[in-house]
Image: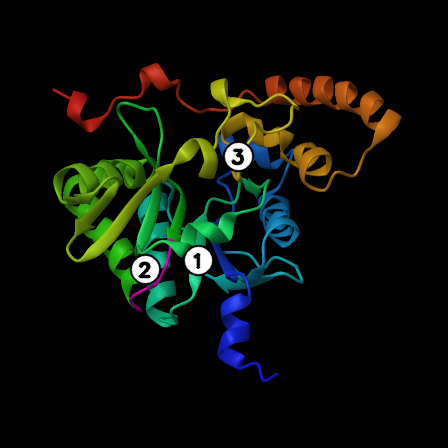
Amino acid sequence: MNVHADDCAMSLPTSVNLLTCHFSSVPGSSNAAINELISGARQVELLARSFQKNARLGSAYLISDVEVASDIWKTIRAPRPLQNELTLAVIRQFVEFFVSRADGDKYVVCDPDVLLVGPGIEKVFDDTFDIAITRRGDRRMPYNSGVVFVNNLSFDCGQRFYRLQDEIITELFSKEAGWFGDQLVLTEIIEKRSTLVSKDVYDCEGLRIKIIDAAKYNFSPNRDHPYLLPPPRGVVLYHFKGRCRTYMEDFFQFFVERRFKGIVRLVWLPIKFFVNEWRRKSVKPLFSRAEERVMPSDRK
């Protein structure tokens, strides 16, 4: 029986490429305090290894101001931006990346503090969209930029999406260019500059943007820390944020790598839990409390 190469390619699961960005932290910042417990290099390494474990990983690209020693990541060097331009600088790096790689490949673009904890990430790309972002239950910032799916059905959709964000932040959210401007710009794109095509699918300047469930594809624990518990059933991408990154290493070992089993697991799990809680509380990061954040629309 003759089997054509095209038939073999059709039968293979989608190869998913990974793109993230991490710049070294400013001394004295909240990220610097977190990085003393788990470095940025270690976060991106765990991210890549989780994709190797649970997906058919193609290439993994890291944009950073430092070279990361890894047999997985391909590092793209970029200068560390000023702290008050960090968010905008990352977006501009993504524009440059997709301009130089108009290849039609599938990309998961995510923060470094993310783990792939379950199978099925490839299925997201089966649908016909250019970009997919996640929606969560946050009234002021309902869309999260920490996980973005770039389907590349058209060769330039990645660069167009991030170039549009650059333009809007520069125009409307320049004061938030250092932090959470990327969240505000997604709300602007979906709620003010897009047309609803079908349920959870929007058109923005020819870009077909799909909204998917954050509870499955961008899950974040409540109250800024996860405890050392298994991810809820059905979660595919687990997003550590703030102080809960102190859990990331042990979470990977217990629930992704599944290194410990039986009696060893029963003994180590509670010990690790208390150790991580102590570490989390000792960090005392400089993140603003949610109720103290003043959004542009709230300003007088």
List the residue tagged with mark 1. 107
User: Which image quadrant is residue 185 in?
Assistant: top left
Residue extending farthest to the front is 1
Q: What secondary structure is found at the residue carrying circle 2?
A: helix
The answer to which of marks 3 and 2 sits earlier in the sequence is 2
Q: Residue furthest right?
A: 263
Write down the residue under mark 3. Answer: 235
- Residue drawn at point x = 45 percent, y = 47 percent: 110
Q: With 273 as the anchor, is 196 left or right in this view?
A: left
Q: Nearer the viewer, residue 22 or 114?
A: 114
Q: Is label 3 in a helix, a strand or a loop? A: loop
Q: Residues within 10 Å of mark 1 (few under 14, many from 20)?
A: many
Is 194 positioned to the left or the right of 11 in the image? left
CA separation, marks 2 and 1? 9 Å
Picture coordinates of residue 243, whole percent (x, y): 54, 26
Query: 243 or 141: nearer the eye?
Result: 141
What coloring was used for the rendering?
Answer: rainbow
The magenta segment = 150-155
Task: From the image, tell me which residue sits under label 2.
Answer: 158
> What's the residue type where badge 3 is placed?
Val
In this view, the residue farthest toward the top is 291
